[in-house]
Image (cartoon, rainbow, N blue to C red):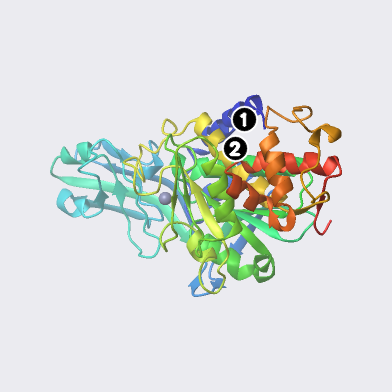
Amino acid sequence: MNQEELSAAGASMMALAEELYPICRSITGDGVRETLRALANRIPLEIHEVPTGTGVFDWNVPEEWNIREAWIKDPSGRKVVDFAEHNLHVVGYSEGFRGTLPLAELKAHLHSLPDQPDLIPYRTSYYKKTWGFCMRHRDLEVLPDGNYEVFIDASHTQGSLTYGECFLPGDSDEEVLISCHGCHPSLANDNLAGNAVAVTLAAELAKEPRRLSYRFVFIPGTIGSITWLALHPEAAKKIRHGLVITNAGDRGMVNYKRTRDGNALVDRAVAQVLGTSGDDFAIRDFHPYGYDERQYGSPGFKFPVGVISRSVHGTFPEYHTSADNLDFITPECMADTLRKTMDVLSVLEHNATYRNLKPFCEPRLGKYGLYGSGGGQRSGEFSELALLWVMNQSDGSHDLLTIAERSGMSFEKILHAARSLETAGLLRREGA
Ligand code: ZN
């Protein structure tokens, strides 16, 4: 993608995040369906429903949760908390409730952040049945004594868990898995930005012929990946590389979390792309807390799935609060995450081993129109040094990623050099 296309992609990702922001999502329910329908307007997405109670490994698909209305009225009858104003005001997956209770009792059901008194926290209670509200500590502190009327019109029913899947077949049935969670309500970086980047990736990949096959899953966190893995044993076996995309739109640098074993091709591809990007970045080792990489990387599967994010969950003050809003993400940062992720996928897609067909001393590049020539390549990426590296290392035992790593050059430059040499008849792809 050129700069203009990237800016357009940034704007369209922002528009998608804006469209999805007001929807109240959870691990199940109509908010998830509405979100997936919006994604399906942009990519070929199959929406699946898995009935409540379905056994998935050690878990069961939970009841479907839907909420229509929720509020608290103070002793004077004034609404002091209203779900209609912000969907973070209700604890996610909260039970329905109607009653009147004194402030002291009500407080056991109220959550706030004393250290961030102007923010509404994000809280859920999926596996313990309870009800609750989240509010600004500033507002909680000034609640007058007396009796409060509480109403939560929410239901837990025998329904289903909804997820979306977009499969883009390639020449090979080896698959790249891209996974992102979409179970958070109005939180922009922690869920919407990842969905926006993944949708755009899918739309871009769909435009071109592919060697690898790509499977995008849009799922509720944890229970969604467990459900998908349990129901798709055959598809899962084809996963060769994977990325979870999350927290993809804030102003922080790109941060990669390695796969469980830490030395997969995707780990090397990300390190090479970030290392030659000229931008700050960080790479962390795997650890078994975070997002769905924990399920993909569990010992029964051991799939090489890393995590692409910008700021790391739990480390920024906006995390899981009302400050993770549309101002916290930018079109430019989502576009940057998109570009780098596309570069990583390009490594997976195009990495190959070549053989130098004139291996006795260096060929005279000028004879082949390659010496000092810059013709035919995009954006000045052509590099004589890249030609020399590829010619020297292509003895049939070094793939392009290895050559990029050893030379310190970007994979894109090395790939371009290999293609130029192949066109000139100096190089042949092994196995081709
Ligand atoms: Zn989260």
- Secondary structure, mark 2, is helix
The residue positioned 25% from the left and 49% from the top of the image is 110
x, y percent for residue 222: 48, 61
Outermost residue toward the left?
145
- Residue 180 relative to residue 374: left or right: left
Residue at mark 1 = 6
Q: Considering only vertical position in the picture, is 241 above or below 282?
A: below
- Secondary structure, mark 1, is helix
Crowd rating for badge 2 (residues with CA inside 10 Å; few <14, some 14–19, many 20+): some
The amino acid beneath tag 2 is Arg
Is residue 157 at all visible to an observer of this figure?
Answer: no
The residue positioned 49% from the left and 72% from the top of the image is 59
From the viewer's side, name the closer residue of 92 and 336.
336
x, y percent for residue 339: 60, 37
The residue positioned 35% from the left and 63% from the top of the image is 129
- Closer to the chain start, of discs 2 and 1, is 1
Labelled pair 2, 1 in contact (Cβ < 8 Å): yes
Residue at mark 2 = 339
The amino acid beneath tag 1 is Leu
Q: Considering only vertical position in the picture, is 62 above or below 147?
A: below
Crowd rating for badge 1 (residues with CA inside 10 Å; few <14, some 14–19, many 20+): some
x, y percent for residue 276: 55, 40
